[in-house]
């Protein structure tokens, strides 16, 4: 799993879980700064399980860490990371979601503009994967 990037919010937890367990274990990413995204959603769930909204929590984490204007870029990054994780398991090439090419191109530019940040270095191995996915999508458009 070290070659996977998991940036999605915590999902699939019953709001009554804290009534039956005394603790909850979360496995953060190897990338410390990027781990703050999913970890923030876990904290939100732990603080108020009945009121927890995964998408709202995730967007708030992105806004707190990167600013409100970064939310669309991180949505595109998240979508591609999820697709990369699934394609690895299915052993198929990554396919972009229909209509997501422009969003991923903008996210790619956003990532490159943030080269001085720690999270950029943590994300660097996935940058090449984004570029491959973009190249493949652009070639598919030419066909």
Image (cartoon, grey):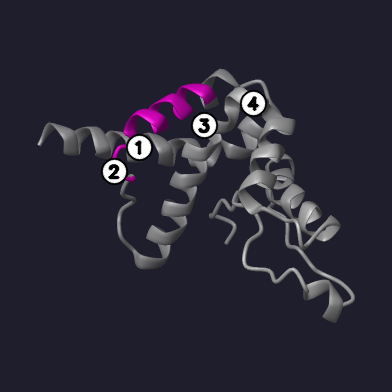
Query: Magenta residues, as a range?
Result: 97-110
Residue drawn 68% across the image and 69% down it? 13
Instruction: Return the residue at label 1.
Output: 100
Secondary structure mostly seen in the magenta stretch: helix
Measured as percent of width and height from the top left, residue 10 is found at 66, 58
Label 3 – label 2 distance at C-alpha: 16 Å
- Checking the image for residue 29, the label placed there is none
Front-lying residue, 28 or 20: 20
Measured as percent of width and height from the top left, residue 57 is found at 69, 46
Residue furthest front in the image: 51
Q: Are marks 3 and 1 in contact (CB under 8 Å)?
A: no
Instruction: Return the residue at label 3.
Output: 72
Residue drawn 41% across the image and 33% down it? 104
Q: Quadrant of residue 62?
A: top right
Label 1 – label 4 distance at C-alpha: 20 Å
Looking at the image, residue 113 sits to the left or right of residue 128; the answer is: right
Looking at the image, residue 139 sits to the left or right of residue 100; the answer is: left
Measured as percent of width and height from the top left, residue 37 is found at 69, 44
Q: Are marks 1 and 2 in contact (CB under 8 Å)?
A: yes
Q: Earlier in the sequence, mark 4 or mark 2?
A: 4
Q: Residues within 10 Å of mark 4 (few under 14, many from 20)?
A: few
- Checking the image for residue 98, the label placed there is 2
Residue 20 shown in magenta? no
| 121 to 83, vertically: above or below | above
Instruction: Return the residue at label 4.
Output: 68
| Numbered disc 4: secondary structure | helix
Q: Residues within 10 Å of mark 1 (few under 14, many from 20)?
A: few
């Amino acid at each position: 799993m070290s070659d996977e990037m998991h940036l999605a919010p915590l999902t699939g937890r019953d709001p009554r879980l804290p009534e039956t367990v005394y603790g909850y274990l979360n496995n953060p990413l190897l990338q410390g700064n990027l781990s703050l995204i999913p970890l923030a959603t876990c904290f939100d769930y732990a603080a108020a399980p009945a009121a927890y909204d995964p998408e709202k929590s995730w967007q708030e984490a992105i806004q707190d860490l990167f600013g409100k204007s970064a939310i669309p870029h991180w949505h595109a990054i998240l979508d591609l990371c999820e697709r990369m994780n699934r394609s690895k398991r299915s052993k198929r090439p990554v396919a972009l979601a229909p209509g997501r090419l422009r969003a991923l191109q903008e996210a790619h530019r956003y990532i490159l503009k943030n080269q001085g940040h720690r999270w950029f270095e943590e994300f660097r191995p996935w940058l090449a994967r984004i570029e491959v996915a973009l190249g493949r999508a652009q070639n598919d458009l030419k066909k």
